[in-house]
Image (cartoon, coloured by chain):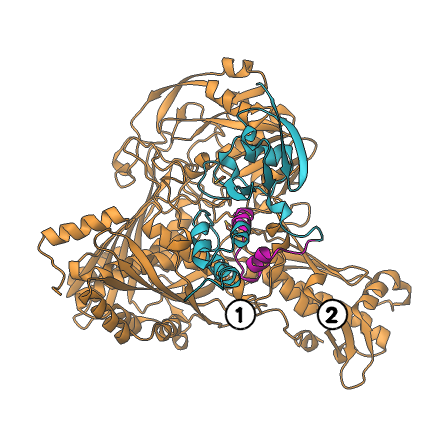
Chain colours: A orange, B cyan
Amino acid sequence: MAEARFTAPQRFVGEPVLRKEDQRLLTGQGRYIDDLDITTLHVAFVRSTVAAGRIVSIDATEARALPGVHAVYTAEDLCPGDMTRVPYSCGFMDSLEPEASFLAHDEVRYVGDPIAVVIADDRYIAEDGAELVEVDYDPIDAVVDHLEAERQRIVHPDLGTNVAYSAEPADMGELEEIFAAAPIVVEHIIDQQRHSISPMETRGMIVVPGQELTIHASIQNPQFLRAYIAKVFEIPETSIRVACGDVGGAFGMKFFLHRDELAVIAAARRFGRAIRWIEDRVENLSASHARREWGRARMALSAEGDILATHLDYRADCGAYPLLPPESNAMNVTLMFQGPYRIARSGVSACMTFTNTPPLVAYRGPWMFETLARESLIDAAAERLGVDPVAFRRRHVIGLAEQPFSYASGAVLTGVTPAEALDKALEKLGGIDAFREMQARARMDGRYIGLGTSVYVEPTSFAFVDFATEAADIRIDPTGRVEVTVTLSSQGHSIETTMAQIVADELGVELDNVVIRFGDTALIGWGIGASGSRQAVIGGGAVKRAAETVRGQVFEIAAHLLQTQPEMLSLRGGMIETRGDGGASVSLAEVARTAYFGTESLPEHINPGLQAHNRYRPAPITFSNAAHFCVCEVDIDTGLTRILRWIGVEDCGVMLNPAVVEGQIAGGVAQGISGVLFENAVYDEYGNPQAGTYKDYLLPLITDMPEIEFGHLCTPSDTPTGARGVGEGGAIVAPAAVVNAVADALTPFAVRSAILPLSPDRLLELISAASSAGVQPPQH
Amino acid sequence: MSSHPISFTLNGAATALEVEPRWTLLDVLRRQCGTTGVHAGCEHGVCGACTIIVDDVAVRACLMLAPQADGCEIRTVESVAEPDGTLHRVQRAMREEFSLQCGFCTPGVVMTLVQMDEAGADEDAVVEALTGHLCRCTGYQGMKRVARRLGQATGAEDRQDG
Ligand code: FES
Ligand code: FES
């Protein structure tokens, strides 16, 4: 019978089938958090206007007296007694956690730090009320530059240090010896600017208190957050329901609950009526951050150009209250810094510090610094050796045949195709020589065109401890329609389509006959939801296995109805048939009807109903990989960089839906490109955000994006669907390609910089500095 | 707060309501009229998520105060498909070209495309109009294909070359 299950003809998996989500989203019938028609009062926050200061007094008298204002709550109201120990980073690792409450009670630690909650009839009045709350601060020196933080005032006195996490490679002494003895050492500095995650829908929450605490929110993971809320408020999970409807993008920002969201829950519990908080864009842009990281990357080479060792001195800004556990990010950077290359020794020294800036949160491929640092170091090394960076990579890159491959860090790579991806990308490019010729001709015309390469391996679908599993429930109803409930969640991930493709293939039904439900703790148990490119792999695995079980149940009943054996049956087009010509058949609808309404006719050993649950745990990591090329042109008069071509070849195993795969990659690449060229969540020396609106915080426009040329290698993973994670890869791999392309374009000026962003003003500065230092482009 | 009576046509239906002068048209459409397909992405006129068509021109609902809509004819995304759900050709193109993921920017994009389609705009004009929309999910790949498709369909006659 097992064999029969695996002969399901693939009609949908692998095809770019149109999305089931689109009908409602295109017609304005999406249901995002603020669209929910629940009668509520409205919340606005009083937030700190200084980056660091002791709160001398909070006067809410006038605000409370404003008609339409129902309540103003400060920390004293919401955190009575010793409520200073909020396990605010969801506490799933042993992070060094400072004391914290939902609202600032003694000290404010960043501009935007929540101080008071105002509840009013509508948002306008709530904001009027918030403005009337007078907060007196005793300002103190803000710690803003994370590279200086170790030596500055302590942000959290209870911890006695600004270092949230630090680590050294165990073999640091030996590594240093290799560097000391190496004939060639290349060093490269990478300084990444602060990014704001900026999903197009801001955060938001509707809290309905009562016997069951109901929380509707714009989040990535209802089950995970319910467990966290239960822990914070010390109430049983079973008394809480967390749900999300359509979510307008998240990218990691909505994986954790920020302190202000906990304050909304606390306020609703105290107030006793339903309240709604919808974050505005100004709040959103300075609510949290990512990517404020610095590195000194080094490579030791033999005289022949063998890579003897690499090392990264990695430093990151955690903000005042990191939500992404600092050590988890440092560990991932450490795990992956070696990348897809044969390198004898590789290590990372990490230091992550607290500052008076907003919380560090997850952002699509939070550990991407390893790729940015390594891939730009490789170009610097190739330049030093006088070899082409693509040739240099091809010499060292790992191919499928060499695996399993043991990393210096101990991790074992299996099933990845970086060498193959690089070759395929090169083929799409049309070869290096042709490009170099075109580049040289362009330079003769005063045009500066560059090629940037980035190759990487990604650890997707982390599956250990609380992240180990996802689950699916599948039932065929008495009419033969299929309802599937999953622990996954979607913020644009298209899982209503891709999961339906898996089920429709397995059960031989049309896509229209499959409905996928998710996003509500009332529907299904524990799961992580959207995180770490896990949905297709782990969730898809659970869906496929549950569908296989239901398929077996269908065959059992059909075999009984057709007076044959289950192994003799096949299933397609809604019909179960006996193999061979002219065999008897029965419809799925008839089998389903029998399973529920004709149970008296079934023999004892056949269970009534068609329903299965599966909880699936894959291997701890499923790797994916990619090689990308960026071709850009830098206008040396304006400093503007334009992307001319983008080639991306990835291996995400079996593609459930290639259009969805390409969409995920494209979105990540866009974030990577704009991360290098545009986005910059600047804070001044006092810790004031300087990019408070979309007029200052620049996102890419349609005209900034090239049309991506895709290539796919599809090496199946060892999981039920054969998929590998692909949600984050574009954002991880793209930035280094842009950095390298700009450096390549500006080779005549000897400008190589990974001090980001590479904005027009900065490039002009670098070009003019190079020119005044006597570096001249060739005359033409 | 003082309240003002205003009336406008919303998706073909005469609508009369009382609004406070400081309320944005965006908030009134969402809260008073229930047309929640009009999305609030930034409320400061940059993202385009709130785009609606007022008197045949695509505008940003967050940049209009509700009293300014008095006497206007307003169309939101809810009016674009047929009542039976059959998608308008720009919606169909959006779907077939995979130009949405989370869908939050989508209603605004649809309204801009509807106006461009009605104006018979060519590909360049459609792309130019779409620079008024921020999409954080898609990298605009599908929207580029939609622009090409609409440009070919509507601007075919006056296009001399590619
Ligand atoms: S909400 Fe109106 S332009 Fe962003
Ligand atoms: S589809 Fe998510 S913002 Fe455009």
Q: CA distance from mark 2 to mark 1?
A: 24 Å
Assess whether residue B87 is covered by the magenta stretch: yes
Q: In which quarter of the view is residue A516 placed? A: bottom right
Which residue lies under the disc numbered 2?
A552
Confirm whether residue A78 shows in the render. no
Left or right, A92 with reference to A190: right
Label 2, residues with CA under 10 Å away: few <14, some 14-19, many ≥20:
many
| Picture layout, residue B70 above or below residue A396 | above
Q: Chain of mark 2?
A: A
Q: Which residue occupies the extreme right position in the image?
A: A600
**Element under label 1?**
loop
Amino acid under disc 2: Gly
The answer to which of A655 and A670 lies nearer the viewer is: A670
User: Where is residue B8 drawn, in percent x and y?
Assistant: 62, 34
Which residue occupies the foreground of this view, A76 or A15? A15
Query: Looking at the rendering, which quadrant does residue A668 occupy?
Result: bottom left
Q: Residue at x 67, y 56 (%)?
A: B86
Residue indicated by mark 1: A654
Q: Which residues are magenta?
A: B85-112
Of callouts 2 and 1, which one flags the residue occurring earlier in the amino acid sequence? Answer: 2
Residue A603 sits above or below residue A110 on the image: below
Asked whether the beta carbons under mark 2 and mark 1 sit within 8 Å of each other, the answer is no
Task: Report the side of A411 relative to A148 (left or right).
Answer: right
Q: Residue at x 14, y 50 (%)?
A: A769
Whole-percent x, y for residue A598 in the image: 89, 64
Along the line of sight, which residue is nearer the eye, A473 or B50?
B50
Work out which residue is located at the far left of the displayed protein and give it.
Answer: A774
* Residue A646: image tag: none
Q: Secondary structure at mark 2?
A: helix
Residue B19, position as x, y percentages in the image: 60, 26
